[in-house]
């Protein structure tokens, strides 16, 4: 996997609110290989959605802006492409689905049209061909009575069905990367599993890479090839899923895992690490996890360097690797 | 849709009856004797009595009402006390003129107001937004009569581009008709355009924040498609509501505008009828206006159902 260059390589991505001095997303870097599933995990508010929107070029609420970084996608830096070319990629080679299936579909347009317009836009297909493609996609995401659904409106579909329709829409142009921002968070537990299964099936059929954003380690354990753990806008730990799960090195990752009831079972409330994420207005110098870290020491006031401690597995902690320094009790519940 | 319209028309019937009772009752309660107005200088009691009998003003009031409404249902709204013409004929002559004015004004208002509202919402906080809002505010603050007089002075007197008077019916001389109606429609349309612009702007601001607009952008659609097909379509529901409400303002404004531009429309008919206590005409006019309002509301409801598919299931 290392021999071929990654499909998408994000380097030093920073996002800032105009008029403030702290980056909401600060120097984020990660790679996504062809067909790979990369999970970005972290508590709510750590900048996952902002990252996804920045990659799509949808960061458009003015005071919020990109504050540096590159995103090489098929050899081109997305952040330096003119808008017309980005539109070409958006919804074509790079597609996205969102957290809220209820509000993400246009209530005034028929399901079929919402899929077909994207097909016409990116494949230059005729109305008829695009409609055929829309039907094919609805069947592929296993929506029952697909033919009938084409002419229905979003309010006639259940939440799970709407998320399937969103997936059909996103996959209609065979993207090489699908970004899914908490695609199952708003859904019932049983539906969640179905949607994850569906994404995995489509991925193996099409060979698309998946950037799956979640705050749910159960989802990560089930889906990820690679894990990127974010805290307060920064990557604190990243590496192959197996390596991160079996040998977490950052105190935050360890805390996350020890608060996970058991792999596979999903729970809404995962993080029981004491304390709260510092507000962007009162971000500490150096390590952003300081205020909650049981291992903090004066040196943590310097920004810890992201260091590889195992093949492809890196950690941003002054004290990593934590072997030997860790409280044994914490380590036990961690795995 | 047909069943829906049928149901709405049925529901409207009690409303129309209520309006008619109200119209009739108001007339009876108003001070002043129509027979005196009709008789002019004549004060001979016998003549007055003859007139009362002729117009059945001696019958009990409920009987008078039933007579009136019964005739109205047969298309007979009575005879104008002033001109001796059938009221329906009078209305039939004048109403199309006012409808032409109102429709042209509404078209002008929509052509200016909706795109301006969309643009200023899209460019919120920029100079475009600022200019649109300032122009809209001036459009609202400038009185119609002043704008009308200024336009006559500038466009007709100074530049000689458009005639200031000389209205011809649309059916007789369409070009002259539209030419003479253009300035009044513009004057009437601007105030409506300003209101429409502000409502369009606020509806669009809400819609532009929605998740489905973000989804539309995530498909790589052009901003034009995002704005018109995805955003404006959803913003149209409140815009239709406002337009329906503006219809009343439009009619009131038409009365005034017709006076300024000496257009022989409904407005002149209303003013003449009220000042001359021409009861039959006033009643007929108010009844027609009421029915027109109800029709507008039914049309607006039909438009909602087209624009908002969720309403179809209800
Ligand atoms: N439009 C916005 N304007 C201002 N701040 C924002 C905006 N969107 C997100 N933020 C802030 O950016 C941070 C990261 O948000 P987000 O990326 O949505 O987090 P996540 O998806 O990880 O829950 C949060 O502190 C949030 O308050
Ligand atoms: S750098 Fe220091 S404060 Fe930050 S996680 Fe490591 S030990 Fe804790
Ligand atoms: Mg989020």
Image (cartoon, coloured by chain):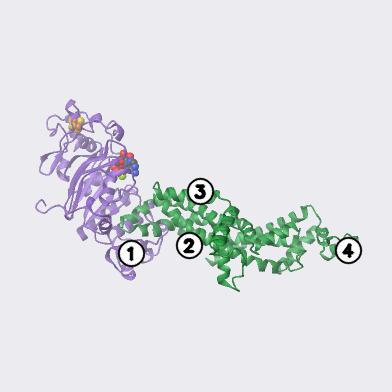
Chain colours: A purple, B green
Residue A165 visible in the picture: yes
- The x, y position of residue B142, in whole percent, is 56, 50
Q: Residue at x 43, y 57 (%)?
A: B232
Q: Do the residues marked 2 and 3 share a common chain?
A: yes
Q: Residue at x 59, y 73 (%)?
A: B173
Badge 2 density bin: few <14, some 14–19, many ≥20, Cα 10 Å:
some
Q: Do the residues marked 1 and 3 share a common chain?
A: no
Identify residue for label 2. Answer: B306
Badge 1 density bin: few <14, some 14–19, many ≥20, Cα 10 Å:
many
Q: Quadrant of residue A163?
A: bottom left
Identify residue for label 1. Answer: A116
Disc with the residue nearer the chain's start (4 vs 3): 4
- The x, y position of residue A82, in whole percent, is 25, 55
> For this view, does A106 lie left or right of residue A12?
right
Identify residue for label 3. Answer: B137
Q: Is mark 4 within 8 Å of ligand 1?
A: no
Identify residue for label 4. Answer: B47
- Chain letter for the residue marked with disc 2 in the picture: B
Q: CA distance from mark 2 to mark 1?
A: 21 Å
Farthest residue, direction bottom: B172
All told, the count of numbered labels is 4
């Amino acid at each position: 996997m290392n021999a071929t260059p990654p499909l998408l390589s994000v380097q030093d991505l920073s996002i800032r609110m105009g008029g403030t001095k702290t980056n909401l997303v600060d120097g984020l870097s990660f790679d996504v290989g062809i067909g790979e599933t990369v999970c970005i995990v972290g508590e709510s508010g750590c900048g996952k959605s902002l990252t996804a929107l920045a990659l799509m070029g949808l960061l458009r609420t003015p005071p919020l802006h990109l504050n540096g970084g590159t995103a090489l996608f098929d050899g081109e830096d997305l952040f330096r492409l003119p808008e017309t070319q980005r539109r070409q990629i958006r919804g074509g080679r790079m597609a996205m689905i969102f957290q809220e299936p209820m509000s993400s579909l246009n209530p005034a347009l028929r399901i079929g049209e919402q899929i077909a317009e994207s097909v016409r836009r990116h494949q230059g297909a005729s109305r008829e061909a695009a409609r055929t493609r829309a039907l094919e996609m609805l069947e592929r995401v296993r929506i029952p009575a697909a033919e009938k659904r084409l002419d229905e409106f979003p309010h006639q579909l259940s939440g799970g069905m709407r998320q399937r329709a969103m997936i059909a829409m996103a996959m209609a142009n065979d993207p090489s990367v699908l970004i899914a921002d908490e695609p199952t968070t708003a859904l019932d537990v049983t539906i969640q599993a179905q949607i994850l299964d569906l994404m995995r099936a489509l991925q193996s059929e099409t060979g698309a890479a998946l950037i799956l954003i979640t705050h749910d380690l159960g989802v990560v354990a089930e889906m990820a090839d690679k894990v990127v753990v974010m805290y307060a806008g920064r990557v604190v730990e990243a590496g192959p899923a197996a390596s991160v799960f079996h040998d977490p090195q950052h105190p935050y990752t360890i805390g996350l895992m020890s608060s996970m009831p058991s792999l596979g079972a999903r729970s809404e409330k995962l993080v029981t690490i004491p304390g709260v994420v510092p507000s962007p207005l009162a971000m500490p110098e150096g390590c952003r996890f300081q205020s909650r870290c049981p291992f903090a020491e004066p040196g943590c006031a310097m920004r810890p360097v992201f260091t590889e401690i195992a093949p492809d597995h890196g950690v941003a902690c002054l004290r990593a690797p934590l072997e030997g320094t860790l409280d044994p009790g914490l380590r036990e519940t961690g795995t | 849709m047909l069943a829906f319209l049928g149901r709405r028309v049925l529901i409207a019937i009690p409303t129309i009856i209520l309006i008619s009772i109200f119209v009739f009752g108001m007339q009876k309660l108003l001070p002043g004797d129509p027979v005196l107005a009709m008789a002019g200088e004549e004060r001979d009691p016998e003549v007055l009595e003859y007139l009362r009998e002729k117009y059945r003003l001696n019958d009990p009031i409920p009987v008078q009402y039933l007579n009136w409404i019964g005739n109205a249902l047969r298309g007979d709204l009575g005879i104008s006390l002033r001109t001796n013409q059938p009221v329906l004929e009078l209305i039939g002559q004048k109403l199309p003129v006012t409808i032409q004015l109102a429709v042209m004004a509404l078209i002008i208002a929509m052509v200016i107001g909706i795109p301006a509202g969309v643009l200023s919402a899209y460019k919120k906080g920029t100079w475009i937004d600022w200019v649109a809002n300032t122009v809209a505010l001036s459009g609202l603050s400038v009185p119609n009569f002043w704008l009308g007089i200024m336009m006559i002075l500038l466009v007709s007197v100074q530049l000689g581009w458009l005639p200031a008077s000389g209205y011809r019916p649309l059916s007789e001389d369409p070009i002259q008709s539209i030419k003479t109606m253009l300035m009044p429609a513009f004057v009437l349309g601007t105030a409506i355009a300003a209101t429409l612009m502000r409502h369009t702007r606020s509806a669009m601001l809400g819609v532009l924040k929605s998740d489905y607009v973000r989804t539309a952008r995530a498909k790589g659609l052009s901003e034009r498609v995002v704005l018109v097909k995805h955003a404006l379509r959803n913003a149209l529901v409140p815009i239709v509501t406002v337009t329906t409400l503006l219809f009343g303002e439009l009619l009131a404004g038409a009365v005034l505008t017709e006076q300024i531009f000496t257009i022989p429309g409904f407005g002149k008919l209303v003013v003449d009828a009220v000042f001359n206590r021409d009861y039959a005409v006033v009643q007929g006019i108010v009844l027609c206006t009421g029915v027109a309002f109800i029709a507008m509301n039914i049309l607006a409801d039909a438009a909602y159902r087209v624009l908002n598919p969720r309403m179809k299931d209800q």
